Amino acid sequence: MNDSPIRGLGGELDDLDMEILRILTENCRRSAREIARMLGKSPTIIAKKLKKLEQLGVLAGCRAEIDYRKLGYGLLALILLNVEGAHIEEVEKQLAKEPNVRIVYDITGDFDVAIVALFKSVEDLDKFVKRLLKNPYIKKSVTSVVFKAVKDSMNIRF
């Protein structure tokens, strides 16, 4: 570790802040007391650091990591869409409301929108794509089925 602060949005983060974030990416349910014990610091200091990280917007909640395969969603699909330019945001908002859709990205390149979605079967995916293509603003789609997730994590290592 070094002692130089890292400039984040809205403030500076020091090495202790970064260590706290590393610990929380492994298990976001750890208490300030447990983190303090792991780092050899007082719980009061850790609690203040956690509050600062939340106020800066660096730490934004704790999310459950769900194994969707165990719930029957064994099919992960990446769907790329060409959308009529004036209606991209409208289509993205509609897609974001779809229950099977995990991610909607507004992208550059040959396609306008990328979707990551989960399905229980090929038939469910087929129905979803055919329903999407009924939207007059969606001009083209390319669907890929994910065989294996080599890495699927919301967090990066820093």
Image (tube, helix red, strand yellow):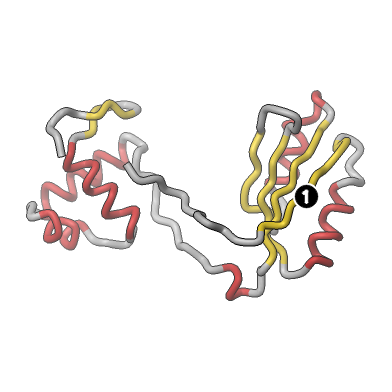
Residue type, label 1: Thr
User: In the image, is 11 to the left or to the right of 74?
Assistant: left
Which residue is drawn at the image coordinates 50% and 54% (left, top)? Answer: 151
Say which residue appears at 72% left-offset and 37% top-offset.
113
Under circle 1, the secondary element is strand
Residue 83 is left or right of residue 106, and the answer is: right
User: What residue is disc 1 on?
Assistant: 143
User: Dot 1, crowdedness within 10 Å: few (<14), some or many (≥20)?
Assistant: some
Which image quarter holds the C terminus? top left
Residue 156's spot in the image, x, y percent? 40, 45
Residue 148 x %, y %: 60, 61
Residue drawn at the location 69% of the way across and 58% of the way down: 100
Q: Nearer the viewer, residue 144 or 116?
A: 144
Residue for point 72% across, 64% down: 119
Q: Nearer the viewer, residue 94 or 14?
A: 14
Decide if residue 91 is on the left or right side of residue 9.
right
